[in-house]
Amino acid sequence: MERYDIENPLLNFRKTLEQIIPLNDSEWQMISQRFNPMEVPKRTQLTKEGQIATSIYFINKGILRIFYTKEDVEITGFIFSEGLFASCYESFLLQTKSNQTLETLEDCALLAIDHSSLQTLYKEVPALHIIARVVAEQRFINGQRILSSHLLDSPEERYHQFSNQYPGLLQRVPQHIIASYLGITPVSLSRIRKRISRK
């Protein structure tokens, strides 16, 4: 994972955006004025199930997750870490009530923009449409990979993929949340980890 300068969140943000498309100083000025820095403590629910997602967040420091609730059981849908955008996207895009909850798993440093400000920014900075498209495409690809893995792979294969793709998260995310994300029980995850450690 790329190292981020916690003391300079806007610098991190600009670097991330310019990996997609270069921005001139005027474009960057308009973008940076619309995103607001936030320090958010661990276990904060930024969007709750049944609420409308009002903002999208760039993660400068920390981890967030999206989860669903079924019969009082939390089912983790995705885990977001530094350098990613996070939101309950369907709710944010359609401005309808969310069937997900977006929660911080660590103390987080975020940059936030609300729905109205983002729509204005699209008009001011046409290059932002390209950035939004690339972010949406990556989100779609991630969703397809998760779906395919749950349909085709064994629990142990899913764990291997997670540990290879997100090695830094294994020690930062509680094991029961990783198990939920992989679609298995914490007991099954513990057994998988023990089998792997014996090899």
Image: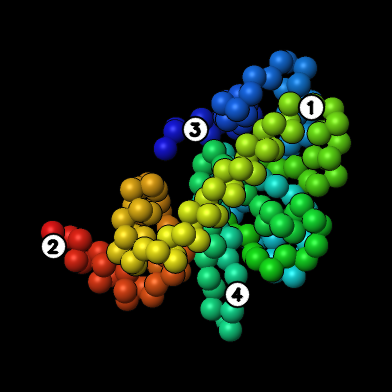
Q: Quadrant of the N terminus?
A: top left
Q: Position of residue 25 (x, y in %)?
A: 72, 15
Quarter-of-image position of residue 103: bottom right
Q: Secondary structure at mark 1?
A: loop
- In 3D space, how far apart are the residues under numbered discs 4 and 2 (Cα atoms)? 35 Å
Between the C-alphas of marks 3 and 2, the distance is 35 Å
Q: Which residue is mark 3?
A: 4
Categorize mark 3 by other alpha carbons within 10 Å: few (<14), some (14-19), many (20+): some
Question: What is the three-letter code of the residue carrying label 1?
Answer: Pro
Whether residue 109 can be seen here: no
The circle on residue 198 is 2
Q: Nearer the viewer, mark 3 or mark 4?
A: 4
Do labels 1 and 3 touch, CB within 8 Å?
Answer: no
Compare marks 3 and 4 and give the one earlier in the sequence: 3
Rendered-image quadrant of the C terminus: bottom left
Question: On the image, numbered disc 1 is attached to which residue?
Answer: 126
> 10 or 181: which is nearer to us?
181
Q: Residues within 10 Å of mark 2 (few under 14, many from 20)?
A: few
Q: Earlier in the sequence, mark 4 or mark 2?
A: 4
The CA span between labels 3 and 4 is 32 Å
C-alpha gap between disc 4 and disc 1 = 38 Å
Q: Which amino acid does the dot numbered 3 rest on? A: Tyr
Q: CA distance from mark 2 to mark 1?
A: 54 Å
Residue in the image at 19% along x and 66% along y: 195
Which residue shows up at 33% across the image and 48% down it? 164
